[in-house]
Image (cartoon, rainbow, N blue to C red):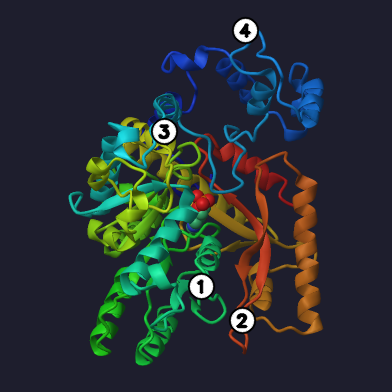
């Protein structure tokens, strides 16, 4: 092994610790979690553990073809109560067994994972108890559990747990919706009754690198996307361009235009770009002072993917007790520096169902100052439906939803209790060691251009060129990046896209299950301030079971 590969190898202490995490939390081991020994769980688990290629599963399942035909044809509810039979209907068990297999070590398609055993246990308990978090009368002690999870995450962020609050809600998209709404209600209070186009002029600010929910939510809120939304330019690393932000903010404030919310992202889905928060906070403070603006922008951070880095805020990087390897330790140290700034946000998005290994959906919007939620309150007159005495204890008047399930919250609570800070640290570090090893192998492979190599996240993207035509992938990418819409440029990009796409299809789902995405990279800005997106391939290494061997096998047949 070369010296540089050696730096990427897994150190003994780490190997032992991650092996323990896998055995305890990702094996569905009936000795530890007896419920998994019962039918139909045991059968479903056994079938999924075979990790068959997607196109072989129906044939391999007992009676699979017939079940598949029945499932496709089913369109009537059975008339009679069937006699006592299996705990799960055969079609339901069949669908569970053949659902996407996130347990396979090869599953690295996206920011999605299998759930940990304790998280599944928590979800089962939540289902059994079935609290509705909308109101304490319908939730009982579950309300206290929700508060406890929120306090733990607040402390981990560096916030005062007594002052902070949060709401478990429907996915990261809704968390971001809360982020926008908090800013709108705080800074344009009349909007609640009169809508956004009444009163003061405003602009919402987000980043061109943000997740699509940054945009779809605005449309949902009735924000004029073309005229009232400013999408800030991004740097080559895909984080927000601070100079452009300052320029746009100045323009708004100079005209007396309110900026209700600035949406930042810490850990973009495809490239793990991490926006800075402290400089944005300082910039807002400075400009609000200068222009005598009292309606300060609400800073919401979309940390749907990136949030588990908060588990490293107190990690001893010098002593490195978990024996994280050197390249990953360096990257983590840098990323953690950025996440230290998360505490300067007003609110942020947590998706437990991504890098937290919790079943769908388990999302939490964290809010630094619980007072902010009063801005979301609707007139209590609207809530005559509920018992008055207990209303004060909830966010009932402030939440977007009425029914709010407890399953995701129970799952998250049990996961935190079992994994602890150290379990999360090991899982995150393991992901990043894999991602870094992958990038390291890619960089030494002919025809490969690694995208945003400095972004030390779980996702690694690349463009693949035909080595027979492209001797220097970096130079080729530089040509693509320097966008010019001449026929030559277009031909070249089209030729390269075609080669990569065909190699991806030839490989099929035999080694790592990667993903081909249309916007893996972008070109430089042209004279009109626009860029083109460039397709590419990505792998997201959140899977606790993926090994270096799986990565080697992929690299071995990368050209198909
Ligand atoms: C996944 C994701 C979202 C959306 O969250 P959902 O839970 O899928 O609704 C938002 N932002 C980022 C950065 C994401 O990766």
The answer to whether 533 appears left or right of 71 in the picture is left
Instruction: Name the quadrant containing residue 176.
Output: bottom left
Q: Which residue position is annotated with label 3?
A: 18
Does the Cβ of the disc 4 residue fall within 8 Å of ligand 1?
no
Sequence-first tag of 3 and 2: 3
Q: Is residue 463 above or below residue 414?
A: below
Q: Which residue is mark 4?
A: 84
Q: Earlier in the sequence, mark 2 or mark 4?
A: 4
3D distance between C-alphas at marks 2 and 1: 22 Å
Residue 130 appears in the figure: yes
Establish whether ligand 1 lies closer than 8 Å to the Cβ of label 3: no
For the residues labelled 4 and 3, the Cα–Cα distance comes to 43 Å
Mark 2 or mark 1, which is nearer to you? 1
CA neighbours of label 3 inside 10 A, class few (<14), some (14 to 19), many (20+)? some
Secondary structure under badge 2?
A: loop
Q: Quadrant of residue 419?
A: top left
Q: Position of residue 365 (x, y in %)?
A: 37, 52
Q: Horizontally, is 173 left or right of 552 in the view?
A: left
Residue at 19% from the left image edge and 54% from the top image edge: 163
Residue 142 x/y as whole percent: 31, 33
């Amino acid at each position: 092994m070369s010296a540089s590969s050696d730096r990427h190898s897994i150190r003994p202490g780490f190997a032992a610790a991650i092996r323990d995490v896998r055995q305890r939390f990702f094996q569905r081991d009936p000795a530890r979690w007896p419920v998994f020994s019962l039918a139909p769980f045991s059968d479903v688990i056994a079938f999924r553990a075979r990790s068959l290629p997607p196109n072989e599963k129906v044939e391999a399942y007992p009676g699979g073809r017939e079940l598949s035909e029945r499932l496709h044809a089913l369109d009537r509810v059975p008339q009679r109560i069937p006699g006592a039979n299996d705990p799960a209907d055969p079609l339901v068990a069949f669908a569970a067994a053949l659902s996407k297999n996130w347990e396979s070590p090869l599953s690295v398609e996206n920011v999605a994972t299998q759930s940990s055993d304790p998280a599944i246990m928590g979800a089962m308990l939540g289902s059994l108890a079935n609290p509705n978090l909308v109101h304490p009368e319908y939730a009982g002690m579950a309300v206290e559990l929700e508060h406890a999870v929120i306090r733990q995450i607040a402390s981990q962020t560096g916030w005062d747990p007594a002052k902070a609050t949060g709401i478990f809600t429907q996915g990261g998209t809704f968390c971001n919706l809360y982020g926008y709404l908090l800013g709108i209600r705080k800074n344009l209070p009349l909007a609640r009754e009169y809508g956004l186009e009444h009163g003061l002029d405003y602009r919402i600010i987000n980043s061109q690198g943000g997740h699509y929910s940054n945009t779809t939510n605005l449309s949902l809120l009735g924000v004029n996307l073309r005229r009232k939304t400013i999408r800030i330019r991004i740097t080559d690393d895909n984080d927000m361009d601070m100079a452009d932000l300052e320029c746009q903010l100045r323009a708004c404030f100079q005209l007396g235009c309110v900026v209700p919310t600035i949406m930042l992202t810490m850990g973009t889905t495809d490239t793990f770009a991490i926006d800075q928060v402290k400089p944005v906070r300082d910039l807002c403070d400075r400009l609000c002072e200068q222009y005598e603006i009292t309606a300060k922008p609400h800073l919401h951070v979309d940390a749907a993917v990136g949030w588990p880095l908060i588990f490293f805020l107190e990690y001893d990087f010098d002593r490195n007790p978990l024996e994280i390897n050197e390249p990953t330790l360096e990257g983590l140290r840098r990323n953690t520096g950025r996440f230290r700034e998360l505490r300067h946000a007003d609110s942020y998005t947590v998706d437990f169902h991504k890098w937290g290994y919790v079943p769908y959906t388990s999302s939490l919007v964290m809010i630094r100052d619980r007072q902010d939620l009063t801005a979301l309150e609707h007139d209590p007159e609207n809530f005559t439906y509920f018992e008055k005495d207990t209303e004060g204890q909830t966010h009932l008047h402030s939440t977007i939803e009425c029914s709010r399930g407890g399953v995701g919250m129970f799952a998250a609570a049990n996961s935190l209790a079992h994994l602890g800070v150290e379990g999360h640290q090991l899982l995150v570090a393991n992901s990043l060691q894999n991602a870094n090893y992958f990038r390291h192998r890619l960089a030494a492979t002919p025809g490969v251009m690694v995208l945003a190599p400095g972004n030390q996240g779980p996702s690694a993207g690349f463009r693949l060129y035909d080595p027979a035509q492209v001797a220097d992938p970096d130079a080729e990418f530089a040509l693509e990046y320097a966008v010019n819409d001449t026929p030559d440029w277009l031909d070249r990009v089209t030729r390269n896209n075609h080669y990569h796409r065909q190699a991806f299809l030839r490989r099929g789902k035999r080694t790592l299950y990667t993903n081909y995405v249309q916007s893996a990279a972008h070109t430089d800005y042209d004279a009109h301030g626009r860029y083109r997106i460039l397709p590419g391939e990505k792998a997201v290494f959140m899977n606790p079971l993926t090994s270096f061997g799986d990565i080697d096998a992929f690299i071995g047949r990368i050209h198909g």
